């Protein structure tokens, strides 16, 4: 198991995440390496139009991260690290739980 410092070092400086369960217009967030929680975006930024489906939001987040050279595995690990602590196994982008990145199920 990797340490928190190793997981933070493997994480991108920042990335976009999908916040499942939030209301449309509030489903996209930004995570910063080593920090707890996320910064919520709003529909006024154009990042999550309320008329978008969850699959479209995931596609958009994956595109934003691709533009930042962030892999789906890194984004999924960063979300876990920001929510549950950078010391946990899920904060490691190489952990098998992150293989799929964000999915619609």
Image (tube, grey):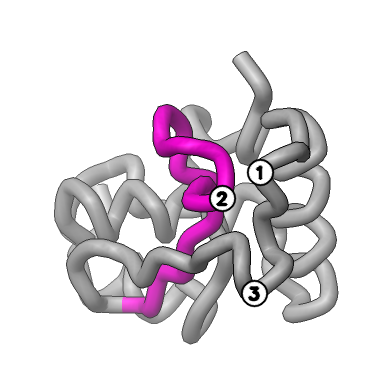
Which range is magenta? Answer: 18-33
Q: Label 2, on which residue?
A: 25
Residue 22 included in the magenta stretch of the image: yes
Distance from Cα at disc 1 to Cα at disc 3: 12 Å
- Residue located at (56% from left, 71% from top): 15
In magenta stretch: residue 19:
yes
Dot 1 and dot 2 residues touching (CB under 8 Å): yes
Magenta part, dominant SS:
loop
Residue tagged by mark 3? 45
Residue that numbered label 1 is attached to? 50
Which residue is depicted at the point 70% across and 55% down?
A: 61
Q: Quadrant of residue 46?
A: bottom right
Label 1, secondary structure: give it: loop
| Quarter assignment of residue 2 | bottom left
Tell me the element at label 3.
helix
Looking at the picture, tell me which residue is in the foreground, 92 or 71.
Answer: 71
């Amino acid at each position: 198991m990797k340490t928190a410092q190793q997981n933070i070092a493997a994480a991108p400086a920042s990335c976009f995440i999908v916040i499942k369960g939030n209301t449309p217009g509030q489903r996209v967030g930004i995570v910063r390496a080593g920090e707890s929680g996320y910064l919520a975006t709003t529909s006024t930024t154009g990042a999550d139009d309320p008329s978008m489906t969850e699959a479209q939001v995931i596609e958009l987040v994956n595109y934003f991260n691709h533009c930042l050279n962030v892999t789906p595995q890194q984004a999924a690990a960063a979300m876990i690290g920001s929510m549950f602590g950078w010391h946990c196994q899920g904060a490691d982008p190489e952990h098998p739980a992150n293989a799929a990145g964000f999915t619609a199920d």
